[in-house]
Image (spheres, rainbow, N blue to C red):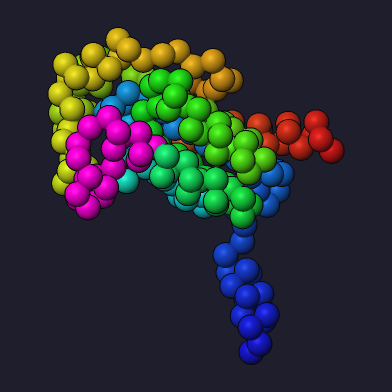
Amino acid sequence: MSQLGERGAAGALFPPPLVRCHYGDPVLVIVTGLPGVGKSALADGLGGRLGIPVLSVDPIESAMRAAGLPEGWTTGVAAYEVAGAVAAHLLGLGQPVIVDAVSDSEPARATWRRAAAAAGARLAVLEVVCSDPSLHRSRLAGRSRQLAHIPEPSWQQVAERAAGYEPWTDERLVLDAVAPLPDLVDTAAAYLVELASASKRRTG
C-alpha cells in the first residue's frame, strides 16, 4: 500500500471531530472555574464525547516543577503560556481543543483569546460552578489527582481564590456541577454544536 493509501486508511479509521467535521471551523473550548468544582471531569468527559484533545494546565505546571522550575507565580504563568502555545498549534492544524484551567483573571483569559485569534478559531467558554458549598467542599477534600508537584488546595485557599475571581465578560455557558456529570456533558456538547452551527449559518 502506498503512503497516500495508508493515510487514507487512517483517515477512515479516525474521522475529524464532530464540531469540525460537520459544523465549521475549529473552536477553543475553555473549561473554567474554581478548584474542586468538577471542571476537569467535565473537560475530560466532553473531550471523550467529541473526540477533542484536552490540555490541562495543572499537570503541565506539575511537570515543569518536576523538571526543576521553582514553585511560584512565574511558573504558573508559564504553564498557561505552554498550554496556549500548544492549543494555538493544534487549532492551526484545524483541530478543536479543550483547555482545563481555573482562568480566574483577565491576564489568564487573554492567553486563550490570543491562542484562538492566532489560529482564526472561535472561543467557547464553559464556566463550571457549584451552588452547593458542602458538595464543593467534599469534592475538594476527596479528590486525588496524583500530581506530585501540585498540592491540593485547602478549602480556605479556594475561598480566598473565589474572593478574587474576576467575572467573565465573554459570552459563556454556566454549568452548575450539582447536576450529574453525564447531564453536564450532554448540555455542554449541545451548546458547542449549536454555537458552531450558528457560526456556520452566519458565514454560509
Query: Farthest residue toward the bottom?
Result: 1
Query: Farthest residue toward the top?
Result: 163
Query: Farthest residue toward the right?
Result: 204
Q: Nearer the viewer, residue 22 or 29?
A: 29
Quadrant that contains the N terminus: bottom right
* Relative height, residue 90 to residue 173 (above, below): below
Give the residue drawn at x 67%, y 40%: 120
Percent across and percent down for residue 121 are 64, 40
In the image: residue 76, left or right of residue 68: right
Q: Nearer the viewer, residue 22 or 121?
A: 121
Instruction: State the predominant SS element of the stretch in magenta.
Output: helix
* Relative height, residue 169 to residue 36 (above, below): above
Give the residue drawn at x 62%, y 68%: 11
Quadrant that contains the C terminus: top right
Percent across and percent down for residue 181 are 38, 34
Q: Quadrant of residue 9?
A: bottom right
In the image: residue 92, left or right of residue 137: right
In the image: residue 165, left or right of residue 91: left
The stretch in magenta equals 61-80
- Camera sees residue 193: no
Queried whether the magenta region covers residue 182, the answer comes back as no
* Relative height, residue 183 to residue 96 (above, below): above
Give the residue drawn at x 36%, y 28%: 102
Percent across and percent down for residue 104 are 38, 22
